[in-house]
Image (tube, rainbow, N blue to C red):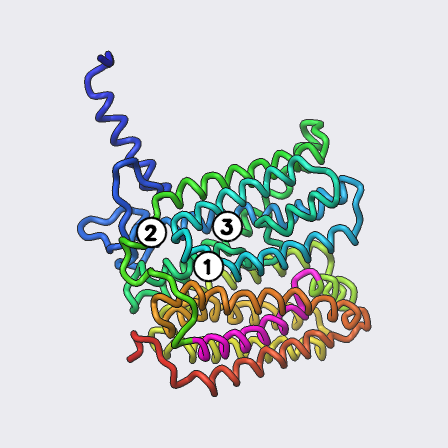
Amino acid sequence: MTVGRPGWRDHDARHASLVSRLLGVGLPGESSTTKPRTGKRTRLSRLFPPSAAADARRIVVVRGLRAIADGFAAILMPASVLARGGGAAEVGALATATLLGSACVTLLAPRLVARFGTRRTLMGLGLLMAATGLGFAWFDGFLPLLLVAFVGTLNPSAGDVSGFVPVEHARLAVSVADAERTALFARYSLAGSLLAAFGALLAALPQVAAQRLGVAPLTAMRAMFLLYAAIGAAAAVAYARIAADGDVAGTAPAPLGPSRRRVWGLAALFSVDAFGGGLFVQSLLALWLLRHVGLSLAATSSVFFWSGLLAAFSFLVAVPLARRIGLINTMVWTHLPSNLAVMALPFVSNPAVVVALWLFRSALSQMDVPTRSSYVMAVVTPAERAAAASATAVPRSLAASVAPLLAGPLFASGFGWPLLAGGALKAGYDLALLMLFRRVRPPEEG
């Protein structure tokens, strides 16, 4: 017999239920369903489309948590290698290993879902994320770190290129009504973008700890990787509440079949777009702004902060625009002007005009992110969604990882050849996408 004050159990139950709803992890014995909720909506649920089910909200919340970890890990990974006595070559090798490893996991994702189901696959990836953090906190040797980088989940790029993406996208697509699918993907992208920026701010904690507490920088970095591991473990716990595939209509996974030709066509076009963007990745663009435009480090940092903020909130603008003019038109007619702005940058010498063009580009260029994800999920059969997400993500990752190797020497010439070439390739992608897929409409567009 348990002795305690009357009402404690009721209070604890109410408190636990409130916490579980805020975290989106549920309580033991509570069912996890992908059916839209009816009745009164909580404050958290009001941030999502009305038809978004519990699984959709949970995935978006966990995406935000993972983005925080990705934000600081992408900066601390090279910093920790340098603190261990490594150099630029080791950092480059680890970055390449992470991209190649992520591409392999993404390619295997549909088979993992077919074998183990969505819930166990996401739980396994969460545990792999935890193991990755522990590996970077524990190991010092280059070869062990290289192995952890290849097998693990570190994300060195601005966007999410991990194996989580195709699995989450496939479940999101069946967790909301077709008419609100793009709105849900916009919130998914927004959570990742904003919280990754917050995570990047956390990367300064080791320096603060070293200056104010006297903690060795490498020791503080190891602690941050333990935080990365803890976030991975929390993600695995949250994913345990995802509904089993058998409880969700349209989630029995299958390899590409009737949509194979359409998906590979999209994958080829997305690869051209990713390669073009890889020619002016943020680190190379920052170098060009500092050396050839003459911006200070503080001004360059400010430019990237505001450009990131504009890009993040453009996700939400994309939703009503897509509802009005369609997904393909939104992808093309917002993306094309932004690419023309990039092509103009090498011909501008006034720093203020350079900054204005880049901010204009940032306000438009990312509207195709949620619309692209929504479109891919809409134009394939439900069973093919995990395979389609994987087939379109892997070529993008590989193309984006190759381009910076070519862009570095071109930026060193002083003229922004990579900006001109990258913008032209991305503009060509826009026109090809419009020409080839304007008649392939998602269900909500009739």
In the image, residue 89 above or below residue 366: above
Residue 286 badge: none
Q: Which residue is mark 1?
A: 111
Which amino acid, by three-letter code, is at mark 3? Answer: Leu
Disc 3 versus disc 1: nearer the observer: 1
Q: Position of residue 443 (x, y in %)?
A: 30, 75
How packed mark 3 is, by other alpha carbons closer than 10 Å (few <14, some 14-19, many 20 or more), is many
Which amino acid, by three-letter code, is at mark 1? Answer: Arg
How packed mark 1 is, by other alpha carbons closer than 10 Å (few <14, some 14-19, many 20 or more), is some
* Residue 198 vs residue 3, the one in the foreground: 3
Q: Which residue is mark 3?
A: 195
- Dot 3 and dot 1 residues touching (CB under 8 Å): no
Which amino acid, by three-letter code, is at mark 2? Answer: Asp
Is residue 189 something that shows in the picture? no
How packed mark 2 is, by other alpha carbons closer than 10 Å (few <14, some 14-19, many 20 or more), is many
Q: Which residue is mark 2?
A: 55
Residue numbers of the magenta segment: 260-283
Q: Position of residue 427 (x, y in %)?
A: 57, 81
Mark pair 2, 1: CA separation: 21 Å
Residue 242 lies within the magenta run: no
- Dot 2 and dot 1 residues touching (CB under 8 Å): no
Q: Residue at x 71, y 79 (%)?
A: 347
Disc 2 versus disc 1: nearer the observer: 1
Looking at the figure, which quarter contains the C terminus? bottom left
